[in-house]
Amino acid sequence: MTGSANSNGASSFVLDGHDVSWALTSDHLAWQESVRSFCADVVAPEAAVRSIERRLDPEMLTAVGRLGAYGLLAPSRFGGGEADLRSLCLAAEEVAFVDSSLAVTVHVQAISVALLAHLAKGRDDLLAEILPSACAGSTFISFGLTEPTGGSDAGNIRTHARRDRDDWVINGSKQFITNSGTPFSKYVILFAATGEPVRGRPPVSAFLVPLDAPGVTVGEAYPKTGWKSSDTHPLFFDEVRLPATALLGTEGRGYREALRFLTWARLPIAAMSTGLARGCLADVLRFLEDRESFGKPLGEHQGVAFQVAEIASFASAARVMTYDGAWKYDQGMPIEREAAIAKLIASEAANKAAYIATQIEGGYGFIEESAAARHYQDARILTIGEGTSEVQKMLIARSLGLGV
């Protein structure tokens, strides 16, 4: 990075895409600029207020739909963008640069739309009914996997679906379900046990469950430490009766199929982590512009300058690993290890960047109106969601032939 400590310096280092130019085409860069402009004009001005008030903005969610972010990975014949994973990562990164709450909202909708298109492949009547409005943002689909007793053991599923003649009847509960209580939330892709245990675990199937079905209860929103203006609720299912057509894919293979398909979903989280680290860098450089200490600009103290250099290094390393994985996925290469490495490195880097940013800004970094404070709050979940850092280490170790 050359030049003075200002936003232009930050831009030349981590903001314009040229540090991963090998991974991005001119179309990617044009999309990145569109999302960035949208975020600067529409998302950033009230991001702090929305977070402090824990307020989701339906009008903004509708505007994101017009931008085209929700349906990036959906087939074009159903209203999607039929884009690649790098495009979704760019959207996640740019939104998280200013508002991680909105970024996770976009992420969950985008992966849920893609998953529905995958699990319901060949059922054009169902996809034609739901996907166009889901891509537009007037229908939200949530992802119902996590359970109160499951944690990192995602396959520990107690929610159960039993057959009753031609119907399915579902009982159980899900925890920490994003986008389940917005004004647009209409469905959840629910994972439930559908049979007797095999080697200790029952087979698991996927179902498309309307959130207004009799017996479905959306619990109270969680008072979260971060991602405060995103929507997250528990879901409860009490004798929820569904037709046979609610089953998505093959009975007993829903969980396995979803995990295989969603290996790539760790990469948009890595991209969100990268965007957050970039946001920390930009906020610190802004903070340093008019701060003096002991007779000289704060940024000219070596101890401070070196910490800023660390943030820049974290953001750049996270970005390279993220787009290495996304590029490989878009080329049809296996990415199980790459996705785990990118998610691990980027999420841990985001937490380190947020810690340093708040430390440099001192008392100002402890005030909720500051971007650094918001990034600090939002960073903590990044080493937990989409698989904890410990799970990523396990996956990496297994890829090296270690029997953990």
Image: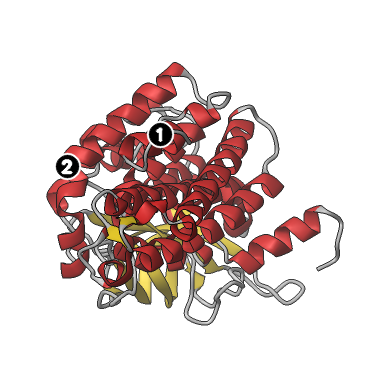
Q: Name the residue under label 1.
A: 3
Does residue 104 show up? no
Residue lying at 38% horizontally and 52% vertically, measured from the top left: 299
Q: Is residue 383 above or below residue 339?
A: below
Horizontally, residue 99 falls left or right of residue 165, namely left
The image shows residue 14, relative to residue 207, as above or below, that is: above
The percent position of residue 109, horizontal first and vertical second, equals: 36, 49
Q: According to the image, label 2 marks what residue?
A: 42
Q: Identify residue type, mark 1.
A: Gly
* Label 2 CA crowd tier, 10 Å (few <14, some 14–19, many 20+): some
Label 1 with label 2: CB-CB less than 8 Å? no
Tell me residue 297's x, y (percent). 32, 53
Vertical relation: 87 (above or below) 356? above
Image coordinates for residue 316, horizontal then vertical, percent:
53, 42
Furthest-front residue in view?
295
Q: Decide if residue 38 is on the left or right side of residue 339.
A: left
At label 2, the amino acid type is: Val
Q: Which of 322 and 249 is in front in this view?
A: 322
Q: Which residue lies furthest to the top in this view?
A: 26
Q: For residue 186, say whether it is visible.
A: yes
Q: Quadrant of the C terminus?
A: bottom right
